[in-house]
Amino acid sequence: MQDPDRTRTMDSTTILAQASPESLGVSSERLGRLDAAILGEIERGKLPGGVAMIARRGKVAHIKAYGKLDPRRDDPMQTDAIFRIYSMTKPVVSVAAMMLVEQGRLLLASPVAAYLPEFAAMQVSVEADGQTLLVPAARPITVHDLLRHTAGFTYQFMGVSAVHQQYAAAGLFARSLACADFSKALARLPLARQPGSAWSYSHATDVLGCIIETLTCKTLGAHLHEAIFAPLGMVDTAFHVDAAQHHRIAEPFPKDPDTGARASVFDVRTPTAHEMGGGGLTSTALDYARFMEMMLSGGVLGGVRLLGPKTVRLMTSDHLGPIPVTGDLLGPGHGFGLGFAVRMHDGIAPGAGAAGQYFWAGLAGTSFFIDPKEELHAQFMIQQPGRREYYRSLFNELVYAALID
């Protein structure tokens, strides 16, 4: 294994070098269909621009920029554009947590309160007969719960119940709120469900980020840079964008082209007190591809090993079993691992892919998937929140349609 201290000088040209699509079992003609579909969306005024990247068997089969970097300017999109990746932060933070597990500094079965004492005596909100009651949590929230979203937390936009209204009033998305203050504010709120009783998308990975800060005595951004970004050569991934690189930031339409609603994305041009483990990173297609290639390769990239292959397998296996799923983020045929959604069957799901594929996406439209059987990973980087699920599905279908062996 390469000495991690030497990773800054790692030769980037040997990792994810570009090759002809046909040499990787990908059809150039069918990639043209992908390009045409994306350009059609741009011509119809539905999408300002984006970057598509497909890698197979360790090489890049396709990378292309489309449309404009910022619809308010004429600058064309570039392949090194910087995107707000929102919840694509979660897999990265989950990897950082599992690295601490491998070091013996964190245990999946441990109560969260062992690291953040404010979560020691949680209450659960229960609505019955038109009243909202609080009952004690039946068991402690564990680190495992955080990674698989069974902790009982929620997001304010995931419902309209009394507890969702409390979440909204607490201002948990305030970027001025330091991680320790965020953790205490969240712990004062009741849980939406009993721990372990359901999969419910939530602030769980934000709490995981606070545990990482506690264990490492560093900000989450500093630790991620040291443990993941520098070793993998992810030079453009961080919780804010330096002034010298502001010209590379991709932006959405000011208003949603379908609804007319104002597009709201967070400011990435200045540092923030709360480096949110659940959704705060910015990155590029080229950077995130290095993270995906590390996962696809069993935890190693360019001789630098972040995780053992058994840990990668654990993270990308289903951890829900019979636990019910709330909401519509996990569709039919899918489970959830440790930081990633996992496809469970070749069929059932209404879309291209096969059992073993794992993936996630971000609120502003970015999405990725990794398919170990096909030795494939792909991503579509955009900044257009309103039609994100449509573009994720469209991209996935056209990528698989381009595979010819």
Image: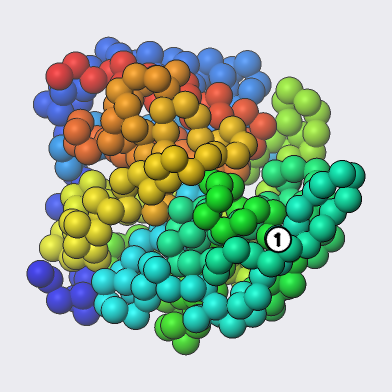
List the single residue furthest toward the bottom.
Answer: 217
The answer to whether 339 appears left or right of 372 in the picture is right
> Which x, y percent locates residue 88?
48, 50
Residue 279 visible in this rendered orientation of the protein: yes
Residue 266 visible in this rendered orientation of the protein: no
Locate the C terminus and report the quarter of the image it occupies: top left
The answer to whether 70 appears left or right of 360 in the picture is right
List the single residue furthest toward the right.
Answer: 130
> Which x, y percent locates residue 351?
42, 20
Quarter location, residue 204: bottom right
Please report the residue visible at 56 percent of the width from the left and 29 percent of the height from the top.
389
Quarter location, residue 191: bottom right
Amino acid type of disc 1?
Val
Please report the residue visible at 31 percent of the width from the left and 39 percent of the height from the top.
370
Please report the residue visible at 69 percent of the width from the left and 35 percent of the height from the top.
253
Colour logic? rainbow
Q: What crowding class fits label 1: few (fewer than 14 Cα within 10 Å), some (14-19), or many (20 or more)?
A: many
Locate the N terminus and report the quarter of the image it occupies: bottom left
> Which x, y percent locates residue 396?
40, 26
Q: Looking at the image, which is closer to me, 145 or 360?
A: 145
The answer to whether 94 appears left or right of 307 in the picture is right
Q: Looking at the image, which is closer to me, 124 or 354?
A: 124
The answer to whether 402 appears left or right of 211 in the picture is left
**Which structural element holds mark 1?**
strand
Which residue is disc 1 drawn over?
A: 124
> Which x, y percent locates residue 360?
45, 42
Please report the residue visible at 38 percent of the width from the left and 48 percent of the height from the top.
319
